[in-house]
Amino acid sequence: MKLFIVAALFVVAAVAAPVNPDADAQILRFDNENIGVGPYGFAFETSNGIAQNEQGELKNAGTENEAMEVRGQYSYRGDDNVVYTVTYIANENGFQADGAHIPKAQ
């Protein structure tokens, strides 16, 4: 009888547990262009609505102004069911992000 009660409690706990659809997200697309030298690029999309693409390359190679420059964009669905998109560039001037939901400097 005790075993039955314990088993029933486990079933109730399993049924009552919150479901997280992100835990089972699948990769729908993955592209990768990177031979270890020169420019690179990648992109991916997942079944839970996350997507990213990025390209990078070395600017002014061999000079004192040599710097890596990365450009990209990512998007995701927020808890409010809105898709948020961020476009960015990262270079010698730092990381600069832009998106409709990101406050702008005055």
Image (tube, rainbow, N blue to C red):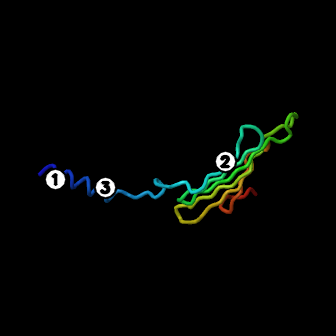
x and y percentages locating residue 12 in the rendered image:
26, 58
Q: In this rendering, which labeled residue sits more in front, label 3 or label 2?
A: 2
> How crowded is the residue under tag 2: few (<14 C-alpha within 10 Å), some, or many (20+)?
few
User: Would residue 48 appear left or right of 66 to someone viewing this image?
Assistant: left
x and y percentages locating residue 24 in the rendered image:
46, 54
x and y percentages locating residue 73 in the rendered image:
69, 55
User: Would residue 84 appear left or right of 7 to someone viewing this image?
Assistant: right
User: Would residue 71 appear left or right of 26 to someone viewing this image?
Assistant: right
Image quadrant containing the C terminus? bottom right
> How crowded is the residue under tag 1: few (<14 C-alpha within 10 Å), some, or many (20+)?
few
Q: Quadrant of residue 82?
A: bottom right
> How crowded is the residue under tag 3: few (<14 C-alpha within 10 Å), some, or many (20+)?
few
- C-alpha span from label 1 to label 3: 15 Å
Q: Amino acid at mark 3?
A: Ala
Near-viewer residue (4 or 87): 4
Extreme residue in the left direction:
1
Mark 1 or 3, nearer chain start: 1
Q: Determine which residue is flagged by label 2.
A: 32
Q: Secondary structure at mark 2?
A: strand
- C-alpha span from label 2 to label 1: 52 Å
x and y percentages locating residue 37 in the rendered image:
75, 37
- C-alpha span from label 3 to label 2: 39 Å
Mark 2 or 1, nearer chain start: 1
Q: In this rendering, which labeled residue sits more in front, label 2 or label 1?
A: 2
Q: Determine which residue is flagged by label 1.
A: 4
Q: Amino acid at mark 1?
A: Phe
Q: Are marks 2 and 1 in contact (CB under 8 Å)?
A: no
Q: Determine which residue is flagged by label 3.
A: 14
Whether residue 90 is visible: no
In the image, residue 9 sits, relative to residue 57, either above or below, namely: below
Mark 3 or 2, nearer chain start: 3
